[in-house]
Image (cartoon, rainbow, N blue to C red):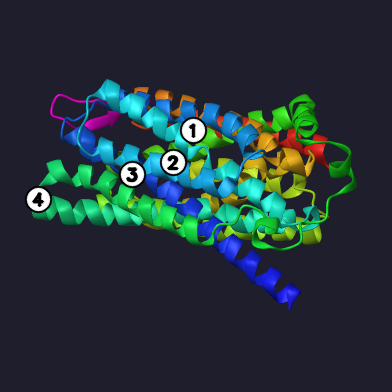
Amino acid sequence: MKFDRCARARIRQVGAMLFVYAIFYVCRLAFSASKKGMIEQGAYTPAEIGYVGSAMLFAYAIGKIVNGFVADRVNVKKYIMLGLFVSSLANLLVGFHIPALVLAVVWFVNGFAQSSGAPCCVVALSRWWPKNKRGTYYGIWSCSNNLGEVLAYVLSAGIVVWVGKAFGPSWAWKSCFWGAAAFGLAGITAAWLFFGNAPEDEGLPPVPADPVDEKVDTSGGQRIALATTAVWIIALAGGFFAASRYAVIDWGMFFLQVKKGYTEAGAATVISINSVVGAGSSALSGIVSDRFFKSSRRELAIIAGVMNVTALSLFMLVPGRHPWLDVTAMVLFGLAVGILLTFLGGLMAVDLVPKCAAGAALGIAGMGNYVGAGAQSIISGCLVERAEDGTATLLGHTFANGYTLDWLAVFWIGVAALSLVLTFAAGCRTRR
């Protein structure tokens, strides 16, 4: 009977982690889905949007390490509810078309609040499951990123189209933020009802500690995380990966519309494919590495790095509109992102430290990820310019044969290649 109760509690916990963190992504990506409308309506310039996006990501980077260290020490159920509440409130405010400077401040606060979600989930995961099953359940939880992206793009596109037809384009982009705020409230309710802090709080026995966990307390474990060189290499590798990943998340729809002539709905459909595929890839990555590679993440991480570079090259370097090629590129990109998001996003770092420092290790890895993502937002925004007629174009170089090489492509593919090199270095240090 006790086993059945424990099993039910863990099923409920992983379901709550999946749903609640997916809602975090809805509250984060409303800004990405609204960019074209904000530019076309003259609400904000591309440069302003780039800087606002980077403000959120830099706040996320700072918050990831701060909240990672905090999450090791607090009731993560209460903390994740607080973070999602602040994020929902930020989305509500942005929908009222606030000045660009105020928007940057509000979105910075949103970034810090957003950064509480992953550490709370990973700390909860370390409290609910033993280390030999960590990769499996970490991978399952990681697909919440992709599920959140699908929800954000599909729901946002639907809201924009409906509100734009019913009330006009000036209201369409604003409705994305108000819709995200409403979904945030649903996520808070789900966390309150189903998210658990630790088995002991549910009257269940605690997860057995590993020998290394018995030798250190939380402060000692966090010092180990800070002193482990491999954790910092993983953070750097993840930073370049995050730059390539968030480039597609933030500007992928924009690129397809401006460069290849897709409609807003068509671009959303193509980009969302990588999220659907990535969800399955994330879920399977931990299972495969636990069962077939003895919990080594090295081999799959390197393969995924190669796929990442290949996918972005197909997506950006082939001129013209080729739907099946773009879909193929997004399938390949989704497979790569699912694996790298799980491994470089934190699992490889968490594997190297005691359980009591899981949040700290995730925070260090996450800081590197979102510094890279924030830098990408600034650079990508500067590589887009607004013409006098209100349309947007991409900066590039035209060769004698008429082929135009976009600097956006050079940047995105370049950071993916650097990520691959550093992933190899990180994998060598974490090989078992």
Residue placed most toward the observer, 215 or 372:
215
SS under mark 4:
helix
Q: Which label's residue is closer to the chain start, 2 or 4?
A: 4
Q: Are marks 2 and 4 in contact (CB under 8 Å)?
A: no
Q: Are marks 2 and 1 in contact (CB under 8 Å)?
A: yes
Judge whether 307 appears above or below 154 on screen: above
Residue 80 in percent (x, y) is at: 51, 45
Judge whether 327 appears above or below 63 on screen: below
- Asked whether residue 391 is drawn in magenta, I would say yes
**Three-letter amino acid code at the position of disc 4:** Phe
Residue 157 relative to residue 19: left or right = left
**Magenta stretch?**
385-399
Q: What whole-number distance in Å separates the C-alpha atoms at marks 3 and 1? A: 22 Å
> Mark 3 highlights which residue?
30
Of badges 3 and 2, nearer the viewer stands: 3
**Three-letter amino acid code at the position of disc 1:** Trp
Residue at x-position 36% and y-position 44%: 88
Residue 176 relative to residue 404: left or right = left
Binning the other alpha carbons within 10 Å of mark 2 as few (below 14), some (14 to 19) or many (20 upward) gives some
Please tell me how many numbered marks the rendered image carries: 4
Q: Which label's residue is closer to the chain start, 3 or 1?
A: 3
Residue at x-position 27% and y-position 36%: 94
Residue placed most toward the observer, 339 or 145:
145
> Mark 4 highlights which residue?
167
Binning the other alpha carbons within 10 Å of mark 3 as few (below 14), some (14 to 19) or many (20 upward) gives many
**Three-letter amino acid code at the position of disc 2:** Val
Instruction: Indicate which disc residue 412 carries.
Output: 1
